[in-house]
Image: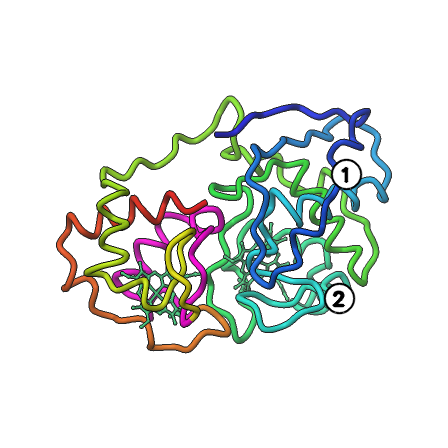
Amino acid sequence: MRVPVVVRVGVFAVLVMGSYAMFANSIPQIESKPPQELSLEGGNVTPAQLVKAGEEIFHTKGTCEICHRIGQKGTRAPDLAGIGARAAKTKPGMSAKAYILESLLQPAAYIVEGYPPIMPAVDKPPIALNRSEVWALTAFLESLGGNVDVTLNDVPATVGAGSGGAGAVAELKIPGDPKAGEAVFQGKGTCIACHKAGKIGAAQVGPDLSQIAKIQTPDYIMKKILDPKGAGTVANFPPGVMPQDFGTRLTSKEYVDLLAFLLTLK
Ligand code: HEC
Ligand code: HEC
């Protein structure tokens, strides 16, 4: 459930509180309280405030840390240390802020070598950041080695139209039974042999799926079960290990139930 609260610049400090202790684990569990909406449009914000707000979003609502770390390699996604400097050189003729915005809004437009194209657009569900949040996040990423020069006008006005609030996109309803899907996960699907999912499982052959619905689209999850190779191998996990034949081994009811279960993992 999403509780939109328009936070004005006056109460900015609320957002900037941070508890980083929870990131001690290598696979972080992001807080699950309802995310707040940040609105900065029309407000006077200093670059320092913007960067601070962006950092907070990076660590919490953005869920970025489930895939990316700053100053640590070996995760599902590129280390973002120094991205503010690197972004200015990645695509010839493209400024740092333009590259960072493109990375956030159209991740597939440029794929960092060695990684699969699995990053979801951050202004669409499930991450669903609004325009102010994308602005702040861009400022924070620029600050990692570069100069903060992004303005609200750099962020297209259409960004975040599907991010929640009054015009929220209806959540996709999978007509499956999550309880039956959990049984498939543990039984016939043998998923548990390689994956942890919340309270069940402990295996680390494949990625921890405990928060998969928080960071991935239903589309990706559906495709990954039927065609693991085609969906792109998650970085730093072995390719070709996830069985490729679930599409023929599971009945359609088992598949839909399994999906319904996976979509509860937030
Ligand atoms: C599901 C995992 C996942 C999540 C969640 C995710 N990313 Fe990514 N991100 C990736 C992967 C994988 C790549 C590399 C492939 C590509 O270029 O799309 C990437 C690429 C990037 C890049 C380009 C990096 C470079 O070196 O050029 C930036 C910037 C970025 N992500 C920022 C973010 C931010 C900020 C968030 C949170 C709002 C986020 N990502 C959430 C997986 C993720
Ligand atoms: C023999 C081990 C194995 C089994 C069994 C297995 N997987 Fe996987 N799975 C992996 C590995 C390894 C990866 C990461 C490499 C890749 O992307 O192929 C992965 C990746 C995934 C991902 C992508 C995770 C991410 O962070 O993007 C999903 C979703 C997934 N598996 C779901 C399932 C489901 C559902 C089942 C049961 C129907 C299952 N897997 C069975 C090994 C397995």
Quick check: is 266 in the magenta stretch? no
User: Magenta stretch: residue 208 in it?
Assistant: yes
Q: Which residues are magenta?
A: 205-233
Closest to the observer: 26 or 216?
26
**Residue at x 29% of width, y 48% of height:** 259
For mark 1, what is the residue? 16
Q: Is residue 100 above or below residue 158?
A: below
Residue with the mark numbered 2: 82
Label 1 within 8 A of ligand 1 by Cβ: no
Quarter of the image holding residue 52?
A: top right
The amino acid type, in three-letter code, at marker 1 is: Val
**Residue visible at 47% across and 63% down in the picture:** 117
Q: Assess disc 2: are there few (<14), some (14-19) or many (≥20) residues with their C-alpha within 10 Å of its C-alpha.
A: some
- How is this picture coloured? rainbow
Side (left or right) of 198 relative to 224: right
Task: Answer with left or right where residue 51 lies relative to residue 254.
Answer: right
Give the left or right position of residue 10, taking residue 123 as reference.
Answer: right
Task: Locate ligand 1 by image quadrant.
Answer: bottom right
Residue ID at (73%, 59%): 96
Position in image of residue 39 (x %, y %)? 69, 29
Asked if residue 106 is positioned above or below residue 72 in the image, the reply reads above
Residue under the image location 66 percent in, 59 percent down: 24
The type of residue carrying mark 2 is Gly
Q: Nearer the viewer, mark 1 or mark 2?
A: 1
Label 1 or label 2, whichever comes before in sequence order: 1
**Label 2 secondary element:** loop
Question: Where does residue 107 sit, x and y in percent of width and height?
Answer: 53, 57
Q: Tell me the CA gap for discs 1 and 2.
A: 22 Å
**Which structural element holds mark 1?**
helix
